[in-house]
Amino acid sequence: MIAGENKKHIWMIIALMLVLLVAFSGCVNISCSYIPDLVITDGWHENLALRNTGSQFLGLEKWCGSVYEINGKYPASLTVTTIKTLILTDEEDLQKKTIETIEETFQDSIQLNESTKLTGERTILKKHKTMYMIYDGIDTNRNEKIKIIGEVWNCGTSGTSIICIGMAYITNNGNPTIENTENWQKIVMDPGGTIGSFTGEEGLIYNVHCH
């Protein structure tokens, strides 16, 4: 009888947990981060077809993402992903997951130069202190140089975590000795020239609106 009562209590606890999860799942509402149209200039645009949203754990974790890109001889792209959970993810864990994502995503086509990898911190327009990591790489299929940035932060106002991953080609195999960093600058620049001394107020990541 005691064993039977214990099983009954366990099932009651499980049932209660499920009820609470379903009840709370509607409480996690997400506001997607974005880059204002004012700074999406010089051929950059949002690829609306690549917008995505999703959820898991009965809606207790939600995310949404946008992709900004520019085509041409030196193509570049920037993905902005917003994540909302009941408890904010630790920023060091965000950084670790972003590094893993970059290294796993590009491992088949991009040779990353670990010896030139840079990490640092900066403050963006919304006054958030971010952590970034920068890689140099070679597209082994096109034999062209690229630069990659991952940058993360938590927004206490919106209760979200933001992950930005940007990539820009800086050479073209038609002119392999000439480096063009124009699109890379657009991704990373800020008023203080924190990254590569690229100075400007219209940097894409610098202007991400998360609240």
Image (cartoon, grey):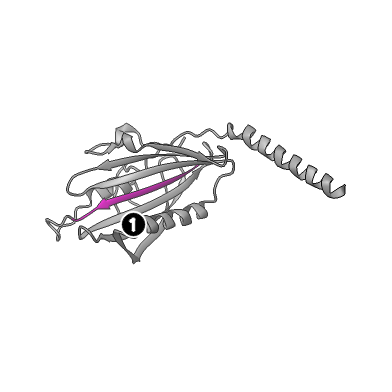
At 54% from the left and 39% from the top, the residue drawn is: 159
At 22% from the left and 54% from the top, the residue drawn is: 170
- Judged left or right of residue 43, residue 90 is right
Q: What kind of secondary structure does the magenta stretch mostly adopt?
A: strand
x and y percentages locating residue 77 in the rendered image: 29, 46
Q: Which residue is mark 1?
A: 106
Q: Residue furthest right?
A: 1
Q: Is residue 189 visible?
A: no
Q: Which residues are magenta?
A: 160-171
- Judged left or right of residue 153, residue 180 is left
| Quadrant in the picture for residue 35 | top left
x and y percentages locating residue 87 in the rendered image: 59, 44
Q: Above or below — where is 119 with respect to 40?
A: below
| Quadrant in the picture for residue 133 | bottom left
Looking at the picture, tell me which residue is in the foreground, 91 or 112: 112
Looking at the picture, tell me which residue is in the foreground, 31 or 25: 25
